[in-house]
Amino acid sequence: MKSSTLVLSLITAFSAHVQADAVVNGPMPFNPIASSAYGMENDGDIATTPWVIPSGYVQSIVSDERNLDIYLGNDWNDMNTVNETGKHAGRYLYRTHEVRGSNSARIDGGSGGAVSVVDLKTGMAKEVVGRADWEALDGIVWTPWQTILFAEEVINSVLPDPAAPNAKSGLLYELRLDPKDPMSAESVTVRPMLGALSHEGIEIDAEGNVYVIDEARTGAIYKFVPETYGDLSRGQLYALKVMNGAKTGAAEWLALDMTQVQISARVAAAAVGATEFCRPEDLERIDSTLYVALTCEDADNSANTSGKNAAGYSVGAVLAVNLGEQPSTKFVVVPGKNVPFEVQPTATTAGVTGFAKVDNLANGPDGKLWMVEDNNFSDIWVYDPNSEDANGDGYKDGVHLFASLKDKPAEGTGIYFGKDPHTLFVNVQHSGTGNDKTMAITKQKN
């Protein structure tokens, strides 16, 4: 009991120090909010303004189940993407719908996952494409060659794709939009060369290599190198291995058996000794660094996959992978290092604001990393890779709390910046209000 009290006191002091930091500058400048939204779950404005946000910002609903309702249950809206380089840049917002099992029953009598789109100019929302065999669609990203990649977050597939029937886990798909109508699909092609995995994060580098993850408690990080730029039908999949059995330090990309990759890339990665991380989820590339959200990673105990450390606090970390000629890895955001541990409130104890169960990532308009948690009272944090390390512990100090979700059972997901550097898009999924939604948080004009 004395030990727990001491740890809690240290966390509280650390939290107070972090929240006292100065304003965060840039296109999205803000004074960090004081704390998570503990105790606000019964506020009367949750249906329309569910986020606690800094002064000078406004939040608004972009689209919800009142203007697009695909499923009998809640629509699980996940990551977002818009056309970044084409003639409609910044206008359309595309979403995957992460439905599973009985939750995939549709209003139209069908079932299965879907990709939808919102026209940010007109407000119109519609389904772009859906299929009965799509399970738990999650990650989604726009490619430099003007297609959309999206994937299934499924560890053990139960609805095989007829075009890849031997795959034992989720698959990645490539959507080509109708050139005359960006709200309609021209074609969808399965890309099994990128691995049968429990997919979520998808990222692409300047050479056209595609990075994916396996969201398992022993999940690896992967890189697909196509034979031809923009052609994902042929190429080589690699898995990351950190040297000497560690999780940080010098690393290498190991080629995988491409026949096995299409059945289970997890098995192929294990065969070459790829490094296992605890539930890699999202990926975000900023320049030559690939950031990886590790939802249950215990940075102090690499063998622990429980999601909590020895003191009982929820863990999670962000890993940075250097994509240069000599790959290397290091943890850059870790609770207890440069951000407090979170203590969720109970009926008899107050909560302590902190960082836990990091899930989705976004590249901010000035190179900062935006992060949202997968837990009650989801927080949005911002990491500045160019900040100082005042105490010399190897961790940059610039981790700041931007927003917190009052909708307690809901989860913030799909954080994303499009063409407007002053607007953050974020979804609210499995909302306690029964109305999932996509929201915009915008800096007010002076």
Image: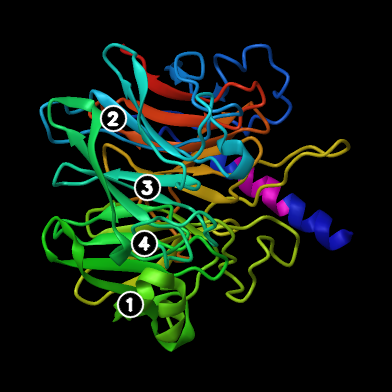
Q: Give the amino acid at mark 4.
A: Ala
**Most foreground residue, 97 or 401:** 97
Q: Is there CB contact under 8 Å for labels 3 and 4?
A: no
Q: Which residues are magenta?
A: 10-16
Say which residue label 3 marks.
384
Q: Is there CB contact under 8 Å for labels 1 and 2?
A: no
Dominant secondary-structure state across the stretch colored magenta: helix
Mark 4 → mark 1, Cα distance in angstroms? 12 Å
Say which residue label 2 marks.
27
Check the picture and name the quadrant holding the N terminus: bottom right
Check the picture and name the quadrant holding the C terminus: top left
Q: Is any part of residue 278 visible from this angle?
A: yes
Say which residue label 4 marks.
164
User: Which one is in front in this view, the residue at disc 4 or the one at disc 1?
Assistant: 4
Q: Is 376 colored magenta in this rendering?
A: no
Residue 259, label in figure: 1
Mark 4 → mark 2, Cα distance in angstroms? 44 Å
Dot 4 or dot 2, earlier in sequence: 2
